[in-house]
Each structure stands twice: as C-alpha cells, then as structure tokens.
Image (cartoon, coloured by chain):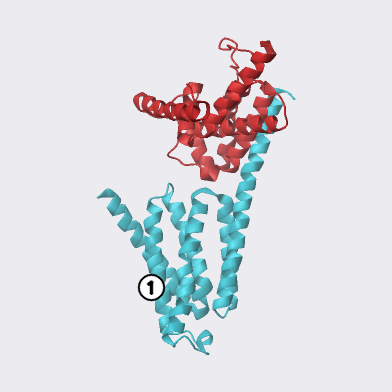
Amino acid sequence: MAPCDREQHALRRARRAYQRAHLLAALRGAVLAGGLAAIAYGLHRMSSASWLAGACLAATLAGLGWRGGAWQRGALAGMIAGLPPLIAPTLVLAASSGWHCAMCDQSPTVPCLVTCLATSALVGLAVGHRAVSDASPRRFAIAAITSAALTGLLGCGTTGLGGAAGVVLGLVAGGVTGWIAATRAAHA
Amino acid sequence: MIDRAALDRWMAAAADGDRTAVAPLFHALWPVVVRYAARLVGDATLAEDCAQDALVQLFGQLDRYDRGRDALTWALTLTTWQVRSVRRRRARRGELDPGPRAADPERETADPGSLDGASFVEHRDLVRAALAALESLGPRDLETITLAVTDADRAVAPATFRKRLERALGRFRTSWRSRHGTL
C-alpha cells in the first residue's frame, strides 16, 4: 500500500472510531431514557403525555449524545438534574399521607405541584451555575434544561398541566438565576 | 513546523462534535505521529501501524480531551503507549525486537541490524529495561520525557519545562535504581 493510501486508510479508521464513539453515546442516552421511563412507571401512574415525554427524552438524549461535546455533557447533567423532580413528588405525597395513600396516583394535589416547582427551581439553579463554567455555556445550558425538563415531566407531567408548567417554569427560572449569579460571581 | 495552536483548536472543535475538524486534525497529526513512532520502533511499516492504532484510539476517545492540556502531547503520549503495547505483544510472541533507533539517518547512532548477536541482545535488553522503568512513571512525567525526546514545541515556559523534566528524570532514575541498582 502506498504511503498516501495508508494515510487515507488510517483516516477512514479514525473517522469510523469517532463516529462509533458518538453512536455509542447516543445509544447510552436512549438506554438511560429507557431506565428513567422504567423508574417513572414504577413510581407514578403513567399518562399518554408521560409516555410522550419519555419518547422525547429518549430522542433528545440520543440526539445530543450523538452530537457530542457540550450538548452531550449538558444532556447528561440535565438528566441527573431531572431526577429530583421525577422522584420528589412521590416522596412528598407519600410522606404527607403517612406513607400510605391508596388514591394518591389518581389525585394530584397542591403539594405535588409545589414540589415540582420547588425542586425544578433548585436543580435549575445548579444547572445554570454549572453551565457558566463549561467551555460552551449556552449549548450546555440549553441541553441541560431540555433534558432536565423532559426527565422531570416523566414525574410531574402525570399531575397534569400544572405539574408540567411547574417543572418547566421552575427549571427556566432557576437556570436563569443560577446563570446570572454565577456570571456575577465570576466578574466580581 | 507544527502549528500547535491550530492543533489545539481542531482538537477542541472535534471534541465538541464538529465533524469538519476531524480531517484537518488527522492530517496535521499523522506525519508527526508516524515520525515519532518510527523513532521508537525503528521500522517504518510497524511505525505506521502504531500511529494508525494510536490515532484511532485518540479519535475514539476525543470526548475525554481536556482543553487545558496540549493536544500534540496527548497524541504523542497515546502513541508511546501504543508502541509499548506492540512491543509487549511482540515480546510475548517471542519476536525479536530491533529496539528504537532514529528515523533520521543523520541522527541514527546504533543500527541494531549492524550489531553482532551478543550486542544485539544486549541492546534489546537495555531498551526493554528502559521501557519497563518508564512504565512506572506517571502520565505527566511520561509526557515531559516524550516532549524532551521529540524536541517538539512546549506549551509551558522553558524554565518550567526544565524543572518538570528534571523531576521526571529524577523519578526515572529512582525507578531504574530500584530495578537494576545503578545509573
């Protein structure tokens, strides 16, 4: 094989390795989304909106994982940030009803909505704060807020429009606040 | 002359998912990595194989690239590890290892092919012993020694580099002494 051919062959192999790494990241994202949907299914009553959120989450994590870089980092961070809004409402509801509530899964309550909003705002703060220190803050923040919102919707979406609005508003408000606070602290 | 700033930029872009940065990054790294591997293994074909495997490994784990570190140093470190793995595999298979030599004929000092049997074995054992001692060093020490051997541009100030090299060689000496008693 001529030296130039060898170089081209090596380039093809390097490209394949690069694409394979990105495809694996996409696959990992889809599998993680499946795991989160399973957790949500175990914790809540799943509505068709929740399944839709699960499908969107799988597509988002896979797409951002394939894209790589800040998008991928943000998606993973957002997925972790979305866990509290996914789990906390169940815990709050169960705790407020003495850990036994036969009608809980059919009766979304105000504590549920408040928990969705509060936990989303708190994790949004953390996401906004973390995004500023990333090499590509905007990409990281957009990816993180999107995947956190979809993860949160798996839980809070079951409570209806109020819960869904709570998780989205909480994340955006918290994220913007965290971003501004971190930027100011960096310039101070 | 390698444009290290461009290399860092391409590496960061490729790590960030920019597919268009893959080809320029590869074409910038390929000749450097092949030359470096040739100096370590002394065989042009084997050097290209090592370079290819090292670059495939690098492109497969670009998401781990740390922007704070020098791209070329990372590539050369991966190549060093790759050469070492090839040496180990060949040693396990019982193949004779010709040992490193300079690819540049002007710098070539000892051609193992021109040595007689006893000298050849001695030369080979010396190279293996040196590589074994190098294995005990940390990645940063290895990078520093690699940079010193390749005469590549350094990302740090000369004084800082000298200090790092001094420390790395100190640790190398300690490692050698603990194995062979002298140096």
Vertically, is A144 above or below B37? below
Residue B110 to residue A141: above or below: above
Nearer to the camera, A34 or B94 = B94
Residue at the extreme bottom of the image, as rendered? A102
Q: Colour of chain A?
A: cyan
Q: Identify the residue under disc 1.
A: A118
| Local secondary structure at mark 1 | helix
Residue type at numbered disc 1: Ala
Seen at 56% across and 72% down, the residue is: A39
> Could you tell me residue B113's position as x and y percent?
68, 13
Observer-nearest of B165 and A137: B165
Q: Position of residue B77 (x, y in %)?
A: 53, 33
On the image, the x and y values in percent for residue A72 come to 52, 53
Q: Is residue B29 visible?
A: yes
Q: Is residue A4 above or below residue A134?
A: above
Q: Residue at x 49, y 80 (%)?
A: A159
Farthest residue, direction front = B181
Image colour assigned to chain B: red
Percent position (x, y) of residue A109? 44, 85
Whether residue A49 appears in this view of the structure is no
